[in-house]
Image (spheres, rainbow, N blue to C red):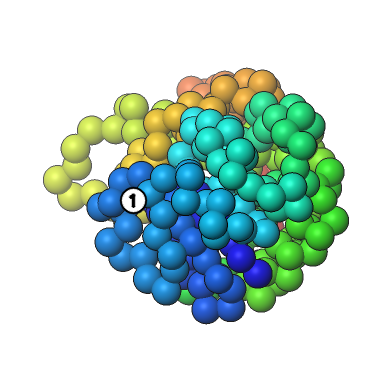
Amino acid sequence: MKILILGAGKMGSFFTDLLSFDHEVAVLESDPKRMRFIYNALRLEKPEQIKDFAPELVINCVTLNYTIEAFKAVLPYLQPYCIISDIASVKTNLQEFYKTCGFPYVSTHPMFGPTFARMGNLEKENTIIISESDHLGKVFFRDLYAKLHLNIFEYTFDEHDRVVAYSLGIPFASTMVFAAIMKHQDAPGTTFKRHMKIARGLLSEDDYLLTEILFNPRTPHQIERIQEELSVLQEIIKNKDTASMKEYLTKIRSKIN
C-alpha cells in the first residue's frame, strides 16, 4: 500500500519506521531538519508533490493544532479513494471535518507516546479506534495495532472524549499541581524523583496538546472530583483521624487492585 505520513515529529517518525518495510511510504514535512533521520521513505517538502505519489492512505501526525489545516493542504492532491486518518489525542472538531471532507476516513488514538512508553515493547499499552470510521480503514489499523500487541478498544467520537477526559485529564491536572507547588530538594526521596520524572515528561509535551486535553468540555468534572477528594483527605489529616485514614487507604487500595 502507498502511505503518506504528514509530519516527521516523534509519532510521524514512529509510523514511518513501523510501516516503511512493508509498504511504500512517503513523508511530507516542511522542516528539512526533521527529515534527517527518515530513511527507507520518500521525502516530500510540498503538498504538490503528493499527486505523483498517489497515496492510498494518509496518516496525519502533525502537531494537534495543525491537524485540520494539514488535511486541507493535501486534500486537493489526493485521489477520491484515498483514506485519510488522524492519531490525534483530542478529537474536537475532527468529527465535523470528516463529515464534510468528501474522503473515507479512520480516526484512531494510540494511548501512548515516545515520552513515557517503551516504543519497542508496547504490549501493555492501549489504543482506540473510532467506531464511525471507514470499514477498510478500521481493518488496516486494527491489523497494524494487533501486530504491536496493543490492547485495542473501539469507541465513538463522544465516548473517546469521555475516556480522554478521565484517563488524561486527571493525571495531567494532578501532575501540573504537583509541579506548581514543587520546590528544589537537596536529597529527594524515590517517590519524589518518580513524580519529578513524570512532571518533566509531561511538560515536555506540546503546549497546545496539554491545553486541549484540559479544555476538553468533560475535563472540568474530573478536576472537580480531584478537588472533592483533596477536601476529604485534608479534613482527615487536619483532624488526625486515624480510623478515617485507615478507611480511606482501604478504599483507595481497593480501587487500584
The picture places residue 255, in percent across and down from the top left corner, at 70, 49
Give the answer, above or below, for where 23 lies relative to 225. below
Q: Toward the viewer: 257 or 105?
A: 105
Q: Tell me which corner region of the image, top left, top right, bottom left or bottom right, holds residue 123.
A: bottom right
Can residue 63 be seen in the rendering of this structure? yes
Could you say whether the residue bearing mark 1 is in a helix, strand or loop? helix
Q: What residue is shown at x 59% (from left), y 73% (from top)?
A: 23
Q: Report crowding for label 1: few under 14, some 14 to 19, many 20 or more residues within 10 A (C-alpha).
A: few
- Residue 163 sits in quarter: top right
Q: Residue at x 48, y 45 (%)?
A: 48
**Residue at the farthest bottom position:** 21
Q: Where 89 falls versus 257 (above or below)?
A: above
In the rendered image, residue 42, in percent from the top left (x then y), is placed at 43, 65
Residue appearing at x 14%, y 45% in the figure:
186
Which of the 4 image quarters holds residue 137?
Answer: bottom right
Which residue is outermost to the front?
52
Which residue corresponds to mark 1?
Answer: 197
Amino acid at the residue labelled 1: Lys
**Nearest the camera: 252 or 60?**
60
Residue in front for this viewpoint, 168 or 69: 69
Residue 247's spot in the image, x, y percent? Answer: 67, 41
Where the C terminus falls, by quadrant? Answer: bottom right
Above/below status of 180 relative to 135: above
Q: Residue 189, percent across and down?
A: 28, 52
